[in-house]
Structures are given as C-alpha cells and as structure tokens.
Image (cartoon, rainbow, N blue to C red):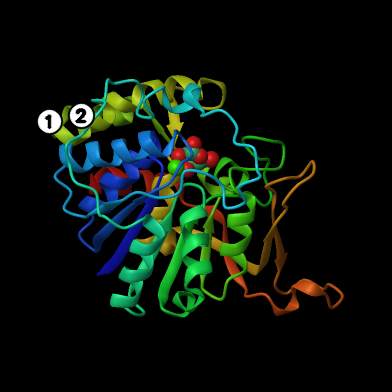
Amino acid sequence: MHKVIYDTDPGVDDAMALLFLHRHADIDLIGITTVFGNASIETTTRNALFLKREWNIPAPVAKGASVTIDPSRKEGAWPTFVHGDDGLGNIDVPEVVDVPLDPRPAYKFIIDTVRANPGEVTLVAVGRMTNLALALKEDPDIAGLVKQVVIMGGNFYVPGNVTPVAEANIHGDPEAADIVLTAPWQVVVIGLDVTAITTMSRGYLGEMAARGDKAVQLLDKLSQFYIDFYKHAVEDGMMVHDSCACVYVVAPELFTTISGAMRVVCGGIADGQTIVKQDGRRFPPGDWDDLPSQIACTGIQSQEVIDLIRDTL
Ligand code: BDR
Ligand code: CA
C-alpha cells in the first residue's frame, strides 16, 4: 500500500488525479495539501474541500502557500483561460464549502505526517513546489524520511508550455523547484516529455461518465472547459498531466526513465527551465557532481496509462 500526500492546485487535471488517488486500491491517500497555481490559494483550497465533500474523500485538507518562496518574485495572472475562473471549469462551485480544514499550514502537515510515518510516505506534487520547499527549509531531515517524491513538472527534451523552455508548475516557483530537485531524497519527474503525449478524448471521458458513476459525471462536467482550452494542441481532448504522476506511483513499468543531477534556471530568459546532467554522459567534473541523482521520465505507454485511469475511476 502506498501512503500518499497529494500536493495540488485544483485545477481540472488535478481533480482527475485526486479521484484516481482516492479510488486506487493500492493507494492510501493520507493527506491533501493545497498550493497556489491554477488559481489563488483561496480558490484551490476551496476546490479541494469541494471535491473532498462531493467525492467523500476522508483525507484531511491542509492549506498551503499563497506566494512563491522568494517573495520578491512578481506573481503573474491566474490562468483562468485554462481552468476557468473558479479553477474547475466554471461549474459554479459554491463560494464557501463548509468542510473543516486541518489547522496546520501545508508544510507543517507534511513534516508531521512524514515524521509519523518514517520511510513510508510518497509525496505526489502536481502544482508549484512551494510547500515541499518550505517543509525542507523548516526541517531538512525529512528528506531522509520520505519514501519518494513524484512531481508533475518540467520538461527536458521537449518545449515548455508557458515559455519556450519552461513548464507551468516549475516556472511558477523556480526557486522552490530547485530546492526540491537538489535535496537528498528521491525525486521522480513526470514532465511534459510524457504528459503532453498522454491525452484523453472528450468521447472517452464521456463514455466513462455514461456508466453512471456520480463522481465521474462531475469530473466529466468540470473537464469540458479545459478540453475546449486544449483545442490548439489536442484533437477534442485534454492532457492528463497530473494523473500521469499518480499512475507512476502504482505502475512505474509504464514509463521509461533517465537519471542525473537536476537544476532549475532561476531568472533570465530561461527562467524556470529544468536541466538534467544525465548520468553516463561524459562531462568534465563540475559543481553538480555532489548533487543527488534524480529520475526523469522520458517515455510513457500513453494508452495503457489512460486505460488504467479509466479502470481505476
Ligand atoms: C501543470 O500545470 C497545470 O495547469 C496543471 O494542473 C498541471 O499540473 C501542467 O503544466
Ligand atoms: Ca496541477
């Protein structure tokens, strides 16, 4: 059984991934932590509480960071054209959802839960990496107590999606992502190299909803706006970025990987670019030699991943 803390900014594809984590038989979802990104922290937290209530998810929700770890960074506008004004496809999520929050900030929830379950917790982070970086800053020793960190973010051998070289989750807080990737824990990076080619069509999701399950019907409804947004890149469907990271936890055999030290560019025209110094390639000795070797996914069996999502939901 995989004990998972899900760090998320719901977000349409975040919602699908949440339902996957909740319903997969080999996953014990022990916490949901929110972060700003697809919308403000108030909106992403409200959305997490809304989905928890609608889908009867027992895991507690802890509210996380509202700004980047470097407060001098200027925050861009929320990507309402991707996930809608309400972050969930403009389905009229109630302004207030009357479900109690965990009293702790997300980074503290992460520290306490990891310390209570040494060696057992997988962190799945699919938004800005701010909460994870704050947890590491407060208590660096948790790095040795976490089982694995699986993140959706970055891109190595394909273009970015918010700049020519950067992906949204990393670009939204590059300093935090650099802290996470250079910490002495095992990070698996599920980036655009694999998520941009893993798409679910409107019809496929519609067939899932037609089986009558209320939770999947809500997911189908809230996904329509996001599918419309993806018209420029996907033929009547959507990239299921965040679900790919969740699938990796239970089915890593569906991915091919490379390994190496990783850094994030912080500033300048390549702000937010992720770089891997791939193991096994010949480079002169340098500054990165002491960094941990992390894992990046560069290949995926997309149809098997999509089918596993369907079968789990
Ligand atoms: C990532 O950005 C967000 O829009 C999605 O939820 C996903 O986590 C993809 O770049
Ligand atoms: Ca996300």
The crowding category of the residue bearing disc 1, from other C-alpha atoms within 10 Å (few below 14, some 14 to 19, many at least 20), is few
Q: Nearer the viewer, residue 109 or 168?
A: 109
Picture quadrant where residue 280 is located: bottom right
Disc 2 residue: CB within 8 Å of ligand 1: no
Q: Nearer the viewer, residue 177 or 262?
A: 177
Q: Is residue 5 above or below residue 162?
A: below
Q: Amino acid at mark 1?
A: Gly
Number of the front mark, 2 or 1: 2
Write the residue at 64% across / 55% down: 175
Q: Nearer the viewer, residue 143 or 298?
A: 143
Q: Classify mark 2: helix, strand or loop.
A: helix
CB under 8 Å between discs 2 and 1: yes
Q: Amino acid at mark 2?
A: Gln
Q: On the image, numbered disc 1 is attached to which residue? A: 212
Q: Classify mark 1: helix, strand or loop.
A: loop
Disc 1 residue: CB within 8 Å of ligand 1: no
Residue farthest along the right direction in this orientation? 284
Write the residue at 29% across / 41% down: 48
The percent coordinates of residue 296 (x first, y second) are 58, 61
Whether residue 251 appears in this view of the structure is no
Q: Quadrant of the N terminus?
A: bottom left
Write the residue at 30% across / 46% down: 18
What's the distance in space between the residues labelled 2 and 1, CA to CA?
7 Å
The percent coordinates of residue 114 (x first, y second) are 35, 72
Q: Quadrant of the C terminus?
A: top left
Q: On the image, numbered disc 2 is attached to which residue? A: 217
The percent coordinates of residue 134 (x first, y second) are 50, 61
Q: Is residue 270 above or below residue 25?
A: above
Whether residue 102 appears in this view of the structure is yes
Sequence-wise, the earlier of marks 2 and 1 is 1
Q: Nearer the viewer, residue 180 or 186?
A: 180
The percent coordinates of residue 106 (x first, y second) are 37, 56
